[in-house]
Image (cartoon, rainbow, N blue to C red):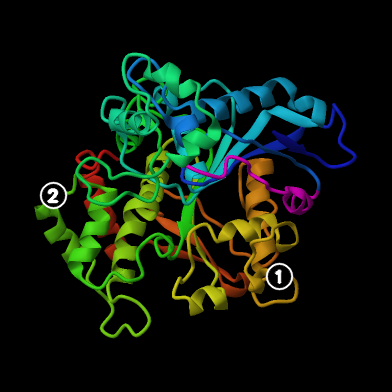
């Protein structure tokens, strides 16, 4: 665990706290390696930033009937939140003003914490930011047994003492046999193997169902994602509709042939000539993005709006190098701007000082740190940035942060609403 605070913070400073959960598909990136200096500076040094590690892969998400507690990676995160409640005041933080946030799998973690235990509020956090939450299908403990069986068999741990055998394997031995296998009903492995499971304890229901029934902690929230969140995951060489459908089926193997007929009508292929990649790459990407990232975020906004303020966003900052690769505005590309180019080794060049997209950094930093400090992104927003109105039944609009840091509010168009409604309607049969 890392705690970063202003140099002049004292035990009585009572500063707002931001606890960040990193992504990595629940399979990698257990160490966040995030420098919070830029975020603290953007908050006028009125903030404490906490980053954590948590178990990923089989260490965090292996389960075996009633012998292994499910979702240990998520439970690690709870322990970190509990630690903050007990100790953060010693670093100048206010345990009664904690915002939890994350990107990708970290953002999905945020949603799992919001809906955990049927939405029981234990006072561990008071606001939430979910950036590009990844919504995979949830398997039950029983349905995920094949993962344990396959790993144990590959490691030679069969028989009634298989768990004890696994516990005696070295990390290197486990890693050598830790590779992805297809989901039940799939033909190729999904991008990520080890995921949270529906254990009817920590996770009590499918996510859409929990949101629909209001079984979540009612706190102010931000949900959103990037314009082209699927491009880095989908195969560039997808050249036919069948290849596109197979990729989606491998990720969501309960989709029926009848559904694919409807899906292909909802997502027509926009490309006619494709000199540098398969003609169905972007069609596959558009489908995958809206199933996994964009539609879940918008649904969460709508679920929250009657209970507490919720804000929606779309990151639309085009980096020339990413555009040249055909990626558009890819998954979690806002993270480097939020951290600040000076404090990360992975920033696009256009985000660096003096370049065209540098002005986007203070825009996102001021919106986000304003929310961290006041639970409202507008209080300390960047001068010239549009007022970010909250989501509501009669105002389904999101802020768009564009190339060069320009901002505007946009209504969610009818086409996107129609496509998202399709996924909402079929969420239960897809285990979402």
Q: Earlier in the sequence, mark 1 or mark 2?
A: 2
Q: Is residue 235 left or right of residue 361?
A: left
Residue 62 sits above or below residue 295 on the image: above
Q: Residues within 10 Å of mark 2 (few under 14, many from 20)?
A: few
In magenta stretch: residue 218: no
Residue 160, horizontal then vertical, whole percent: 32, 14
Residue 263, horizontal then vertical, whole percent: 19, 60
Q: Residues within 10 Å of mark 1 (few under 14, many from 20)?
A: some
Residue 204 sits above or below residue 279 on the image: above
Looking at the image, which residue is at 62% across and 22% down? Answer: 82
Q: Assign the N terminus to one quadrant of the image.
A: top right
**Residue located farthest toward the right when viewing the structure as drawn:** 8
Residue 352: which numbered mark, if any? 1
* Dot 2: element: loop
Residue toward you, 28 or 431: 28
Looking at the image, which residue is at 19% across and 40% down? Answer: 429
Q: Is residue 164 left or right of residue 52?
A: left
Residue 4, horizontal then vertical, whole percent: 77, 40
| Magenta residues, start to end | 26-44
Q: Assign the C terminus to one quadrant of the image.
A: top left
Residue 256: which numbered mark, if any? 2
Is residue 56 shown to the viewer in this render?
A: no
Residue toward you, 86 or 147: 147
């Amino acid at each position: 665990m890392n705690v970063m605070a202003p140099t002049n913070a004292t035990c009585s400073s009572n500063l707002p706290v931001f606890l960040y959960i990193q992504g990595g598909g629940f399979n990698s990136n257990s160490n966040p390696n995030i420098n919070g200096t830029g975020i603290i500076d953007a908050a006028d040094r009125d903030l404490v930033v906490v980053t954590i590690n948590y178990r990923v892969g089989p260490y965090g998400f292996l389960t075996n009937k009633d012998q292994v507690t499910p979702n240990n990676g998520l439970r690690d995160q709870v322990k970190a939140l509990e630690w903050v409640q007990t100790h953060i005041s010693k670093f100048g933080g206010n345990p009664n003003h904690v915002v939890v946030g994350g990107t990708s799998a970290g953002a999905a973690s945020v949603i799992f914490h919001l809906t955990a235990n049927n939405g029981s509020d234990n006072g561990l956090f008071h606001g939430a930011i979910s950036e590009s939450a990844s919504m995979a299908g949830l398997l039950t403990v029983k349905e995920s047994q094949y993962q344990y069986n396959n790993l144990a068999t590959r490691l030679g741990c069969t028989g009634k003492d298989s768990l004890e055998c696994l516990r005696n394997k070295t990390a290197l031995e486990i890693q050598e046999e830790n590779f992805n296998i297809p989901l039940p009903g799939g033909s190729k492995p999904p991008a990520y193997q080890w995921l949270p499971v529906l254990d009817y304890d920590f996770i009590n229901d499918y996510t859409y169902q929990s949101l629909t029934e209001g079984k979540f902690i009612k706190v102010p929230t931000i949900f959103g994602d990037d314009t082209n969140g699927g491009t880095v995951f989908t195969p560039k060489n997808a050249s036919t509709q069948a290849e596109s459908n197979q990729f989606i089926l491998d990720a969501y193997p309960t989709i029926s042939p009848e559904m694919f007929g409807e899906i292909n009508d909802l997502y027509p292929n926009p490309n006619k000539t494709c000199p540098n990649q398969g003609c169905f790459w972007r069609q596959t990407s558009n489908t995958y993005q809206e199933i996994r990232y964009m539609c879940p975020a918008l649904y969460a906004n709508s679920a929250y709006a009657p209970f507490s303020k919720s804000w929606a966003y779309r990151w639309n900052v085009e980096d020339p190098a990413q555009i040249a690769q055909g990626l558009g505005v890819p998954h979690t590309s806002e993270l480097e701007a939020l951290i600040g180019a000076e404090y990360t080794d992975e920033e696009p060049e256009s985000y660096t000082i003096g370049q065209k997209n540098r002005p986007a950094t203070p825009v996102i930093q001021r919106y986000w740190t304003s929310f961290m400090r006041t639970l409202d992104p507008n209080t300390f927003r960047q001068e010239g940035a549009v007022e970010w109105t909250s989501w509501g039944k009669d105002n389904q609009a999101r802020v768009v942060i564009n190339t060069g840091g320009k901002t505007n509010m946009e209504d969610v168009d009818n086409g996107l609403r129609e496509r998202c409604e399709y996924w909402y309607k079929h969420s239960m049969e897809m285990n979402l």
